[in-house]
Amino acid sequence: MNRTMRASRSLAATVLVAWGWIALLGGCAGLIRAPRGEALRISEFEQLGDARRRASTRLVVEGLDAEIASTPQRALGRYERAIQIDPGNPFAYLALARYYAAIADPERALEHLDRAQSLLDPDGALYRSAEPHLWGLRGWALVKAGWLADAVPLLAEARRLAPSVWGDGRLDAGELR
Amino acid sequence: MSKQVHGWLRKLIWFGVAVGFVAGFASSVVVIRLDRIVRTRFEGQRFLVPSRVYSAPSILYPGLDIELADLRGTFVRLGYRQAGSDGSVQQGQYSWQKHRVRVHLRAFEHPTRSEPARDVVFIVRDGFIEEILELPVGRTLGAVLLQPEQLGAYYGPDRAQRELIRLEALPLHLVDAIVAVEDQRFEAHPGIDVRRIGGALLANLRAGGIRQGGSTLTQQLVKNFFLTPERTLKRKVHEAVMALLVELRYDKREILETYLNEIYLGQRGSTAIHGVGEAALRFFGKPAQNLSLAESALLAALIQSPNGISPYRNPEGARGRRDLVLGLMAEQGRIEPAQRDAAIAEPLNLAAITADPGDARYFLDFLRVQLSDSYDATVLSSQGLKVYSTLESRTQRLAATALREGIEQLERQFPALVPDDPTRALQGCIIAIRPQTGEIVALVGGRDYQLSQFDRCTQARRPSGSTFKPFVYIAGLEPRVGGPVITLASFLDDSPLEVATPSGPWQPRNFDREFHGRVSVREAIERSFNVATARLAQEIGIGRVADVARRMGIESELPLVPSLALGVADVSPLEMARAYATIAGGGVRPQVHAIEDLVNPAGETLERRELRHKRVIDAGTAYLATSLLQGVAHRGTAAGVRSTGITGPIAAKTGTSDEEHDLWFVGYTPELVVAVWIGFDEPRSIGFASSRGALPIWRRFIGELTGGQIHGQFPRPPSIVVADIDPVTGARALWGCPDRRRELFLEGTLPEEVCPGGAVAGSEEDGRQRTQERFFEWLRRHL
């Protein structure tokens, strides 16, 4: 009886220690990883960064909401204000790139995409979660520009990284939000 | 006899008929002419409305330092008033407590960024906004946009400013107040009021001079609209005839609306205030439709003598006349006695005087040039457009102050700089651009606009001195077939150099008149060595250097001569700011712009400048250049930027042209590029270098703007790798190398040599070293 109890106690302790390690490692991983999800959703970053970045990101989210509500002019105003208070916020340029790709202005979409990419740390977790959008938006813009051959591999990569978002070869405001 | 009488009588009658006919004909001609004048003016564009220029809006959000953002000053400039002591905060008012600032924001109409009127509370802790709540529900807001500040307007020759209003939008008590005091029988008379003229005549006869006017509103309108202010019988007759014509042709509402938009209501500086719409904004900081009874009565009171009883200069006189108007309104049954008494008890409650801030006049001129393709001076001074600019009001004011005070300080330190003729005084300019967007957020083209309207930031072209050198280094660092000419581990030769040119041999010299032999790339730019840089440019090719400069935004002509490398080309501070913005923006050149959009009075967007960028140099090279210029600001000729304790990332370059004619300082943070130029319009020696002249102005400006703490960082692109090098040889410092420093490289450009005594590249030790480097690099990036 005692032996069984001892065995079950040591098993419980082992499980507990193992669980502790898993939690610790998971926690560490959580600290350095982007929020869960297969592709970046900007609203998940509303509370990250310093005060300016948070306010700026909130404005980007408001802009995406405005696009969802079919008020694109208001959305544009929100993105521009987001850049005004934090010109280094990659989300604002990403949202602008999506906006211009959606209205078939590939040149501007690509310009904003370049800017967004230049503001993302390529080794950072944020870059990894934004990667499907970087591939996909470039591909989408190239489709709009009529360069299908160049666009296909980019869209294929985006689809591979985030099939549920880029499966249809486009990114809705709601999917980026 | 009777025949004779009859003959005379007949002649007299005929004469009378003839005179009557001629007089009738002549008056018909006059009436037709006057009628044509009335119709032309009434049916054409009635008012010339100057276009207004606005700043970028202020955005308030949690975490913002309210002192740095100058929150109270912004409220005052926007015409917000302190709320009364009863605890209510009306639209356009604010209440200020230590930990709680409440403001009832006015609505703002704009095609893309309209904001509703909202009652907002800022919870303040330790000088920072902690939370923003919208009343009455207490909903938390992420950010609040204030309406933009008016920077100025494009006036016509009369410098008249007006805000057009529609009669139906005005409160009834405003119309009633004006009619009560100026023309109580307005609805009944046909343009002239005989009873009133008679009354005025009697009053004037009794007083022995002109004390009272008998003009109706229509006559006042005619006088202001069509006629000169002279007091002659002919003008009076014309006035009466035209008043009748106006009443015949147009209905009372149209006449009243025109009158309300036309009436002169005072002066603000050199600007004449016309119409109740403009007066409401200027005197009370609110649209006319929101005027209270007391405020309406004050505007009506001002019509008689706008400057004599100006509420700012003569508050007692203004208040007395206002109360008289309120009394008349009650007497005529337009308001109840209780309303009169309540309005009389109100103080004048004026908005603070917010004259056009003179600081932005160079910017306004620059905007006018940018707009001139489609919108010439006539259009801008008459169409009432709204130009929303990129200028940031606070940034502009700080830039103007830094420049003015900086130059004055130099003149105090070096009295020889002060000439007898003030028009030949030491001048300067400062321009600030956002590198990611290309927006001009501050532009001051000279120390005093009244003294000289020449904009030295956008119109002047002056030798750029050493601020040109980064283009040489970028040309050297850029990837090219066979690899870049230099890396940051390279060494340059700073020994005597002679280059043959068509005008004879050219021998560059250093500022300290010495040669420094073998110097590292970093040392060469940090200490701004001319000879090493000139030799590097020769190696790269001057054409290639010029090409880099052009790609980065230099549009002025660049002579392909060896001395180009040292900044002999004449360029504008605007161009230099744009080129440095390209480096700060990671090699992406922004389209510099000053206008966000242009909106017509109907609220339609006529023009909109979108953000545009173009990659012109690769991101890795731009990052290396930034790293070099950070070294200049840290250890080199620009190290003085931190002498007042400014912290955070700064990259900068000093520049002093030959014989110290021009002092330049171009520096940037992750979010702002600022170029400063100091010199005389007719070039002469200033007598000292840029680090003593232009740098302190830059430092003062950035220090004030950021509070001494610069945020953000220059993003490192993926093509950059970090490796240890031997500082003496520039070779890789692997395991076993005694001395080392970290250096940045473009991928694939690491030195192949290894320091003497170090491990062999590819060996086991080397592998261990690389693994360690990779691990620490990973840790650095992730933690």
Image (spheres, coloured by chain):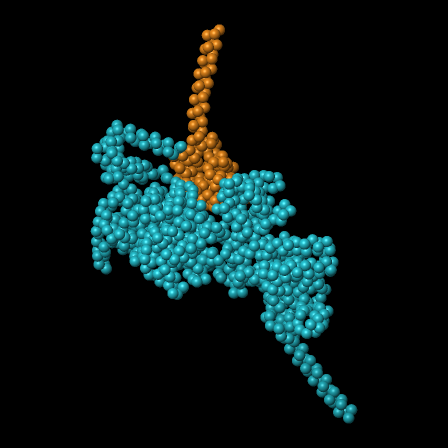
Chain colours: A orange, B cyan
Q: Which residue is drawn at 36% across and 58% down?
A: B414
Q: Please tell me how many numbered marks the rendered image carries.
A: 0
Q: In this view, does A18 lie above or below B259?
A: above
The C terminus of chain B, quarter of image: top left
Q: Is residue B17 left or right of residue B737?
A: right
User: Does the image show residue B241?
Assistant: no
Q: Which residue is drawn at 37% across and 39% down?
A: B716
Residue furthest to the right in view is B2
Q: Which residue is drawn at 57% across and 51% down?
A: B80
Q: In the depicted view, which residue is nearer to us: A9 or B376?
A: A9
Question: How far across and how far down the image is residue B363, in percent?
Answer: 45, 56
Q: In the depicted view, which residue is nearer to us: B754 or B515?
A: B515
Q: In this view, does B496 lie to the left or right of A69?
A: left
The part of the image, by quadrant, that contains residue A127 is top left
Question: How far across and how far down the image is residue B418, in percent?
Answer: 37, 61
The part of the image, by quadrant, that contains residue B11 is bottom right
The N terminus of chain B, quarter of image: bottom right
Q: In this view, does B248 lie above or below A80?
A: below
Q: In the depicted view, which residue is nearer to us: B359 or A141?
A: B359
User: Does the image show residue B219?
Assistant: yes
Residue furthest to the bottom in view is B1
Question: How far across and how far down the image is residue B232, in percent?
Answer: 62, 75
Q: In the depicted view, which residue is nearer to us: B746 or B711?
A: B711
Q: In this view, does B105 lie above or below B23?
A: above
The part of the image, by quadrant, that contains residue B765 is top left
Q: Residue at x 51, y 53 (%)?
A: B54
Question: How far across and how far down the image is residue B394, in percent?
Answer: 48, 50
